[in-house]
Amino acid sequence: MSTPAIHVQNLGKRYHLQNSDVRTWTLRETLRNAGLSILSRLRGTTPKQSRTQEFWALQNVNFTIQPGEIVGLIGRNGAGKSTLLKLLSRITDPTTGRIEINGRVASLLEVGTGFNGELTGRENIFLNGAILGMSHAEIRSQFDQIVDFAEIGAFVDTPVKRYSSGMFVRLAFAVAAHLQNEILIVDEVLAVGDSKFQRRCLDKMQDVARSGHTVILVSHQMQLVQSLASRALLLEDGKLISDGEPGLVIARYLGQKAERYDLSRFGGEPDAIGRFTALSFSSGEQTWPASVAQGEPLTAHLEIELSAPLHEGNLFIAVRNSEGIEVFSSNWSETQPLLELQPGTYHFNVTLPTRYLRPDAYWISLCLIRNQADSISLLRGLEMPPIVPSATSDKLIESRRWGLVTLPCEWSQK
Amino acid sequence: MQRIVIEAGKDSANYWLDLWRYRELLGFLSWRDLLVRYKQTLLGITWALLRPILFTFVFTLVFSKIGKFPSNGIPYALLTLTGVLVWQLFASAFGGCSASLVNNAHLITKVYFPRLILPCAAMAVGLVDFLVALALLFGLMPFFGVWPDWRWLTLPAWITLALLAAASAGIWIAALNVRYRDFGTLVPLVLQLGMFISPVGYASDIVPERWRLLYSLNPLVSVIDGFRWALFGGKASLCLSGLALSILFLLMLLWSGLRYFRTTEKTFADII
């Protein structure tokens, strides 16, 4: 096996948390503590414990990354992702363990680090390049490509403070995208610019990786990690709990343990005549699968309770993706006559067209309607099993796909 | 290919090599400070001349015309201008150095580079201003009948000594300022008082001989005296034992400052 790009052993980082009554570490406080500790030592007693608490942001993390891998780092806020990136980019020092890095590291923890508003675009390209670790000669040779990529054209000699925010972000990313460093560490910076520019950034990232560079990226957009990464690491409470194929790791991250949602406490006014009481999912024999492969069956089971007769009733479901976009919706009345129900508990099933859903996390909204149009119970943001690529899917094809849904198109050649 | 090993609790083995690798960044940061300083100013680099001229005017008026301070035959305006130039070089370099880390907190928390680059780069602005003003001084000297001699060749050494004084104090303050912002408040106070404690507006000869060595504990005394000695020939006195004491003191300060800086450097990003 070749030399790993990054080799991490038993990595840990401990922070001292200050109690809330001491916000800043003042000189007075330090002098006071020093005085107290001398005093107590003179008295022969041990000094009182200082008012700080320990907190391990990262603990016992081990992994090896080979050159050319694109690794997605996922986890909830506060799981230790940023700390790990900071350790890898040498901004802060580990408390325990060892990191070995082979190659020059460029870390993009923020778009436009070190940009100065007073300086022109040209000056900022050179300054930012140098801060990110490019040599003067490298920047000079890439200069025209950077200006082209950023599409700032005639504004290259205008102070950056007069740029629109879009131009600013494009320029900042353009510099970063042309880094020649072997290892690129990226923190959520792709969530910038318009969608066209984002698309170009993604393509650029893939080019970078294809040319043998190593990329580590943090993102909350599972779809991005899914389509870009060849491997994913999942952090939880400072520990590495999953490492492997992105689809599986994402599924674990998004995975639900509950068998069904108990909705009896939510939705509808107390005096409403009906409401949703439970929601569960199944795929074939399996109840509430951790994830569902594209094209596999997925059925949502709804339970409603009526305290009065329902006249001209209807059911509504909408599915939203991880970016918050409603992907599609459906009504009971599209295929069935309006409901006429007596008080009681009823069960309905709705099969979801997973074949058309791109791998991502999804949330559903439910609505119960009477008299054709009056909503009597509305629930939003119910998590459903995430969709992952099917076993047969081609990663390359998947990465070429774009848009909200996967629709079958007939291709032919005449 | 570059290989980096980071181990908990261990010093990076090639710190000084890293500093050398990042020398271009040092240049870029200095260049940035220079550009930003005079962007959107009407007078631009003229400010580097205007300030010493105004100070010289006021000091000459107060110390020479009103206070009747002696000058050992050196034109009083030149005596003061030299003092003001050296003082401003020190003040600007020291001030820049002390504030460099806190001013660049956004870089420290987002990118790696040897942090020592920041205080070093911050001294460039002061140096460039000084060189511009020094040209003014050279241009004025013939009008007062002062001509160059061999002692002028020692000028780079005195400039180095002034920067050494700024750096050794500045590195201490810069590192302390990261944790205790009190030091940031202290710096302008020290600079204001220091201007009168140091022989900026007067010649150091007026200090009685038996106090000279004690007076030399302020390294700026030796630096300013050295400049005057170099520029005005034998007319300004130079206390050699005081100079030796200053250099020794500065080297100790620099050594301890670097040590403190190196041990706290790793925590800058966490506490800044």
Image (spheres, coloured by chain):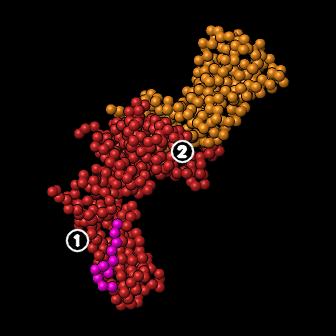
Chain colours: A red, B orange
* Residue range corresponding to the magenta coloring: A327-338
Q: Residue A284 carries which label?
A: 1
Closer-to-camera residue (B206/A148)? A148
Q: Which amino acid does label 2 sit on?
A: Lys
- Mark nearer the viewer, 2 or 1: 2
Q: Quadrant of the C terminus of chain A?
A: bottom left
Q: Where is residue A188 shown, x and y percent of the image?
A: 41, 51
Magenta stretch contains residue B48: no
| Label 2 SS | helix
Q: Where is residue B211 shown, x and y percent of the image?
A: 75, 20
Q: Which amino acid does label 1 sit on?
A: Gly
Task: Compare marks 2 and 1 and give the one earlier in the sequence.
Answer: 2
Mark 2 on the same chain as mark 1: yes
What residue sits 59% from the left and 26% below the top? B127
What residue sits 31% from the left and 55% below the top? A226
Q: Mark 2 points at which residue?
A: A161
The vertical placement of B63 against A48, above or below, is above
Residue B34 can be seen in this image: yes
The vertical placement of A373 against A296, above or below, is below
